[in-house]
Image: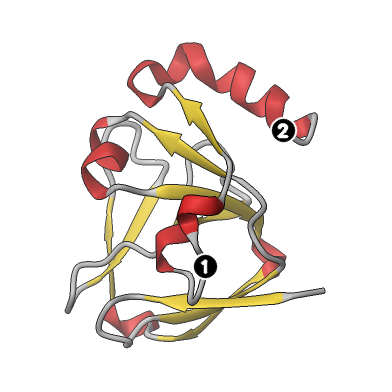
């Protein structure tokens, strides 16, 4: 299996993921649209934080279930624990080393209407879309 590395802008936060993204999700919620986040959700067992645990800060809002991690030095949000998949890790594909995000297929998630959109999203994920 392929391994993908990534991290924040300043390099303090580094991680590895088993696998490579074949598609990403673009969310229109207030946080993701401002960050430009491209979501690649992976099983927690496939994600390894290599360095920078002490350099992370966490932002929570709304239901406070999602743990939006970001580097406290450069501000980059390279991964987080999503509300939609609390047993997984949501990697920002823009923070992966050497990945051409323009070539990845994108699907939309209506995060502005999260409660109405989440069941359909989970169904698409189960179907492998």
Instruction: Give x and y (percent) for residue 81.
Output: 48, 53
Which type of secondary structure does the marked residue at label 2 adopt?
Answer: loop
Task: For marks 1 and 2, give the CA distance.
Answer: 20 Å
Residue carrying label 1: 99
Q: Quadrant of residue 13?
A: bottom left
Q: Are marks 1 and 2 in contact (CB under 8 Å)?
A: no
Position of residue 55 relative to residue 17, above or below, is below
In the displayed structure image, the side of residue 44 where residue 118 appears, left or right: left
Which type of secondary structure does the marked residue at label 1 adopt?
Answer: loop
- On the question of residue 25 being in view, the answer is yes
Residue name at image x 41 percent, y 76 percent: 7
Q: Quadrant of residue 80?
A: bottom left
- On the question of residue 81 being in view, the answer is no
Mark 1, other Cα within 10 Å: few <14 / some 14–19 / many ≥20: some
Instruction: Give x and y (percent) for residue 49.
Output: 52, 79
Residue name at image x 48 percent, y 76 percent: 97
Instruction: Give x and y (percent) for residue 78.
Output: 38, 65
Residue name at image x 54 percent, y 22 percent: 118
Position of residue 50 relative to residue 83, above or below, is below
Residue carrying label 2: 129
Q: Residue furthest front?
A: 103
Decide which of 16, 81 is in the foreground and name it.
16
């Amino acid at each position: 299996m392929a391994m993908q590395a990534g991290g924040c802008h300043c390099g303090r936060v580094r991680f590895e993921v088993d696998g490579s993204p074949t598609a990403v999700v673009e969310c229109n919620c207030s946080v993701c649209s401002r960050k430009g986040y491209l979501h690649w959700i992976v099983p927690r067992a496939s994600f390894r934080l290599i360095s920078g645990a002490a350099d992370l800060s966490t932002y929570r809002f709304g239901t406070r279930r999602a743990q939006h991690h970001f580097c406290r030095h450069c501000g980059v949000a390279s991964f987080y624990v999503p509300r939609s998949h609390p047993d997984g890790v949501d990697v920002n594909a823009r923070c992966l080393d050497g990945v051409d995000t323009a070539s990845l297929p994108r699907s939309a998630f209506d995060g502005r209407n999260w409660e109405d959109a989440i069941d359909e999203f989970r169904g698409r994920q189960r179907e492998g879309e």
